[in-house]
Image (cartoon, rainbow, N blue to C red):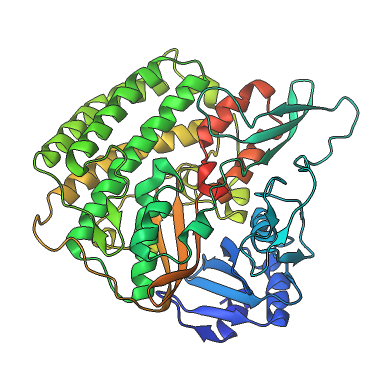
Amino acid sequence: MSEAAALIRAAPALPCAPWPRHLLTAEAWRALAAALPGQPALALLALWADSGHVHALFRDEDTGAILPASVAVAAGAYPALSPARPAAAWFERMILDLWGHAAEGGTDARPWLDHGRWPVQAPLSPRPVPVGGPPEPPGFLPADGPGLHVLPLGPVRGGIAEPAQLRLAVQGELVVRLETRLGWLHKGTLALLRGKSPRAAARFAARLAGDSTVAHAIAFARAAEAASGVAAPPRAAMLRAVMAEIERLAGHLADLASLGQAAGFAPLPALCLPLREALLEAAAAAFGHRLMMDCVVPGGVAAAIAPGGEAAIAAALTRLEAALPALARLHDGSGSLLRRLVGVGVVTPALTRALAAGGVVGRATGRAVDLRRHPGYPPYDGLDVPLPSRQAGDADARVRQRLDELPHAIALLRELLAGPAEGAIGVALPPASGEGIGFAEGYRGDIWHWLRLDGGLIAACFPRDPAWLHWPLAEAAMAGGAVEDLGLVLASFHDSCAGMDL
């Protein structure tokens, strides 16, 4: 066990399911921050807060242990983790914006979600401070140097792309640095969730990121179930997985189509978008909604597969499977995307590991992490979930990773649909008090939800989308690249803005 992990385990354990949350003193938290640089195996997955504490979620990659940890906020501040874990910087900026807790010794204290247009500062704190005066423009890092100039883009970037404000420090056609500013899709989700029952709040959790609605709904439901001390019935877990794998296939196809559009390679979206449409039509026939929104609820699912739904899904899978060779030819054949993608937007395995990034982005650099396999959750813990991975870490590897995962998702879906067709699809959650962590493997990567219940109502919560750890990698991937590759690199990551704008 590493020194940092031992410091967490030595702290008093508070009830939290399925892993106890350890409450560290300020001194122990400072010791943890000091130990982290020499403990690369202790990955930081998330950092968030409530009115009196800051919480972190770690994974010990040597043992696989999940370690939630907390520290009390003293005089409005807490010891920063960003000097040791770069991924903590954006979380610390978010915590300052929403709760007003300052990260002592942090690497960046600029606003993140708060663009100066909120009527109060620290809206989730017990005593928000009214704001007066005009809003300040968002701050970016300076770009000083011979021949260096700034290319501003966004937040409106054309088409229907999610809003992200980008600043490229460029030297001629060479990108020296890409800096991102998000928050334009801030919805006040955390405030909307508080004070509601999990069943009522599930609608807001499902709308955090529309293209990952099933995965976020599963993670939220599992957190509520863990806090309530109940488990969804096996039939409900199977139906959730059916929806999740449909969403995975649709998401990968959408990403491939977007990359083809960014590259000006029309055959790829021409093939992928009709296949995605067939999957969405099958989802509507089976579950009553194309994106399967609000179909996963705490305690189970809203309804079983409708008559004719399984046949519609099977037909869409058959059509997609028949198209896989054509997809491979579009990527590898003569006049394909291959030459345009190799060596573009490279991220190293070391950086991916340092940021604890999973999903397609992580697996494309050899970081074989998938929550369906570890820690595992029903029904995947009873299935053989393949875990292909690549090593190159460039845009080509990310495309190949998506192509590799398509047939495995098809096979999993068929295995799930062949399972038992009877059984309960939901249980009621008692009006309990407790704390829980839920997780799910979305098509972009690992999703985590934490919530605390008080008498059956949500007292505090936090959802963590994969984009928190993927956007910094996209920034790093552009360093040293060409300006003309920006659209291609961003499409190869296809990170969500809505998922982390809260």
Q: Can see residue 149?
A: yes
Query: On the picture, is 279 further left or further right than 270?
Result: left
Q: Quadrant of residue 311?
A: top left
Q: In which quarter of the image is residue 316?
A: top left
Q: Position of residue 440 (x, y in %)?
A: 38, 56
The residue that appears at 45% across and 77% down in the rendered structure is 16
* Residue 480 in the image: above or below residue 76: above
Q: Can see residue 388?
A: no
* Residue 81 in the image: above or below residue 265: below
Query: Which of these two is toward me, 481 or 443?
Result: 443
Q: Quadrant of residue 91?
A: bottom right
Query: Which of these two is toward me, 427 or 267?
Result: 427
* Residue 170 in the image: above or below residue 134: above
Q: Position of residue 170 (x, y in %)?
A: 77, 27
Q: Position of residue 106 (x, y in %)?
A: 76, 61
Query: On the picture, is 72 further left or further right than 137?
Result: left
Query: Which of these two is toward me, 368 or 298?
Result: 298
Q: Where is residue 458 in the image (x, y as percent from the top left)?
A: 44, 68
Most extreme residue toward the top, as rendered? 335
Query: On the picture, is 13 further left or further right than 146?
Result: left
Q: How many marks?
A: 0
Q: In which quarter of the image is the N terminus?
A: bottom right
The residue that appears at 42% across and 13% down in the rendered structure is 334
Query: Which of these two is toward me, 330 or 31?
Result: 31
The residue that appears at 50% across and 47% down in the rendered structure is 499
Query: On the picture, is 60 further left or further right than 31?
Result: left
